[in-house]
Image: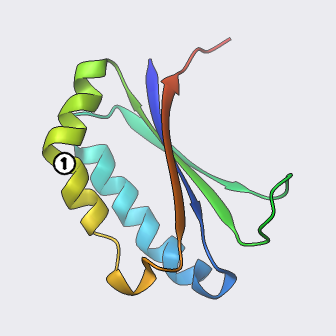
Amino acid sequence: MFFYEVQIDVPVELEAEFVEWLIPHMEKMEELPCFDGSERLEVLDGDFASDAPRFLCRYFYESAEDFTRYLELYADNMRADLPDAWRAHLSFQRRTGSYTEL
């Protein structure tokens, strides 16, 4: 199994509003035929420069074709779902990887 992970750094003053937006956004992502599930994590501490809340959103998929389909058919619309007023204030990192249960 594979995962697509989006890391988001959010200014403290936007955190509550962002989480309110994020939950239904993730539900929309899960409804896409490309993904088999998701999880949302909040980083509570760590070695990073910002004190801003940091969220990790992971979406699980079965094959490279699933992720390619997401990028080609859905990614632009899902990313456009973010309110324009927040774009300059949030920081995103995206990555994919494989997931193995021990």
Q: Give percent across and percent down for residue 11.
A: 64, 79
- Which colour assignment does the render follow? rainbow
Q: Give percent across and percent down for residue 16.
A: 58, 81
Which is nearer the eye, 32 or 52? 52
Query: Where is mark 1, residue-wise?
Result: 74
Q: Give percent across and percent down for residue 10.
A: 60, 72
Which is nearer the eye, 44 or 67? 67
> Where on the picture, by quarter, is residue 67?
top left
Among all residues in the image, which is located at the extreme top?
Answer: 102
Q: Residue at x 85, y 57 (%)?
A: 45
Q: Is residue 20 above or below residue 43?
A: below
Relative horizontal placement of residue 49, taking residue 77 as reference (left or right): right
Mark 1: secondary structure: helix
Q: Is residue 60 above or below residue 72?
A: above
Q: Residue at x 44, y 63 (%)?
A: 23
Q: Give percent across and percent down for residue 36.
A: 34, 31
Say which quadrant the N terminus sits in.
top left
Q: Residue at x 39, y 55 (%)?
A: 26
